[in-house]
Image: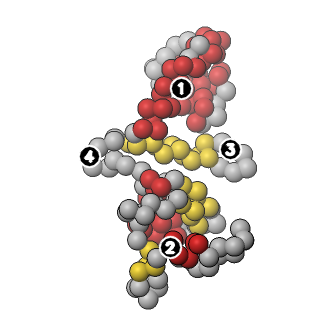
Amino acid sequence: MLMLHVARGYSLRETVARAKLANRADISHVALLKRLRNSDEWLRLLCMELLNGGFSYCIGLPSLVCDFFEVTATIGEGSGETLNRMPVGPHALILADAGHCSVAGIEYVWQHGAGVWVRVNPQSFVAYSESGRRISLLPRLRTLSKVSKCPFAV
């Protein structure tokens, strides 16, 4: 019910109506509100655990409304963070943390006509030029003197 209310943006009334139709719960919107008000510590712990596991959460700008989320296993097939599972449309800009820094993921975003800003994980990410030469990112980044100056396009 929390995912219906928060992630889908349903009102409390619509959330309990959908839960009842799906035979998941039969409570009033007032009862749901009271439970949510008393669950702040549980929600905090849940968020901490999700961040320690495989969790992707996307929001749209400027609305800041969740438009995609996924919880995956932390080990085994299909685990881990990847841009490849996210819905990407043309002209979107994906902003991601180092866990999403992979050549395959960045290529996936570019193939869908979108851009990506990702914190580089130097242990697992190797950049190459169009001619196939390895690009050393750190020396190029050290030449930046202004926020708007970009010494390369990868």
Of the numbered discs 3 and 1, the one sitting upstream in the chain is: 1
Q: Position of residue 105 (x, y in %)?
A: 44, 63
Decide if residue 89 is in sight here. Answer: no
Compute the Cα span from label 2 to label 1.
37 Å
Q: Is residue 140 above or below residue 52?
A: below
Of the numbered discs 2 and 3, the one sitting upstream in the chain is: 3
Badge 2 marks a residue whose secondary structure is helix
Compute the Cα span from label 2 to label 4.
31 Å
Q: Is residue 88 above or below residue 138?
A: above
Of the numbered discs 2 and 4, the one sitting upstream in the chain is: 4
Q: Position of residue 92 (x, y in %)?
A: 62, 62
Of the numbered discs 4 and 3, the one sitting upstream in the chain is: 3
User: Mark 2: few, some, or many residues within 10 Å (few <14, many ≥20)?
Assistant: some
Badge 3 marks a residue whose secondary structure is loop
Q: Are marks 2 and 3 in contact (CB under 8 Å)?
A: no
Q: Is residue 147 above or below residue 76?
A: below
Which kind of residue does numbered mark 3 sit on?
Leu
Seen at 57% across and 47% down, the residue is 58
Is 148 placed left or right of 57 in the picture?
A: right
Disc on res. 137: 2
User: Mark 1: few, some, or many residues within 10 Å (few <14, many ≥20)?
Assistant: few
Frontmost of labels 3 and 1 is 1
Frontmost of labels 2 and 1 is 2
Of the numbered discs 2 and 1, the one sitting upstream in the chain is: 1
Disc on res. 76: 4
Count of marks, rendered view = 4
Name the residue at the bottom extreme: 131
